[in-house]
Amino acid sequence: MSIENAESSRSVYDKFLDFLCYLNTVVTGVGLVVLTAIFGWLVFGRYVLNATPTWVEQVALLLMVYIGFLGASTGVHKQTHLGVSVFKELSPKPIRRLFELLSHLLMGAFALVMTVYGYQLTVFKWSAEIPLLNISEGYRALPIMLSGIFIFLYSIGHLIHFFTDKNTELSDSI
């Protein structure tokens, strides 16, 4: 199958997930660039201007939360997230498929927990302000909920592929 045929045979949902992953990658990349720039400003302000910008630490903490959670969701989509695979690799194919199914199901369940409790935390913290930034403290909890939503969507995509992939029929392996 050529690359064009493989790309055209991808579902609308797969293309949506790829776009979402791309968007997350851009946001986290911009976040890293901004983080680097503000720390450059911190060093310049401290040692050249002799006036340390006080807001840098709070912005850096906020950016780290977004970079970490959105980056983690991207890792789930690309299947580069952390995992213990020694048992899976040592197991026969039917057990490996079972581990793969359980992994996707547990990842989706964990994502739902992240979404629900991330939402509750965001709402709970929305009335407080981040010191020196004068924005809602809820912005620190928002990426937990967003990451949970993205991970859940990615897990659904993995489950769809698990059950529809013609090369690895579920009935042949379990």
Image (cartoon, grey):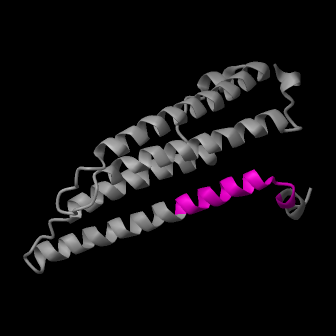
Relative to 70, residue 56 above or below: below
- The front one of 30 and 147 is 147
Q: Which residues are magenta?
A: 7-25
- Above or below, comparing residue 8 to residue 41 in the picture: above
Residue at 49% across / 48% down in the picture? Answer: 146
Q: Residue at x 53, y 36 (%)?
A: 111
Instruction: Tell me the quarter of the picture where residue 81 sits.
Output: top right
Q: Residue furthest bottom?
A: 49
**Is residue 80 among what the camera can see?**
no
The residue positioned 41% from the left and 54% from the top of the image is 66
Please state which of residues 49 and 136 is positioned toward the viewer in this rendering: 136
Q: Is residue 55 visible?
A: yes
- Could you say where residue 155 lies in the image, as x and y percent from the top left? 64, 39
Left or right of residue 86: residue 144: left
- Viewer-side residue, 31 vs 94: 31
Q: Of residues 128 and 77, which is closer to you in this image?
A: 128
Q: Determine the image quadrant of residue 61.
A: bottom left
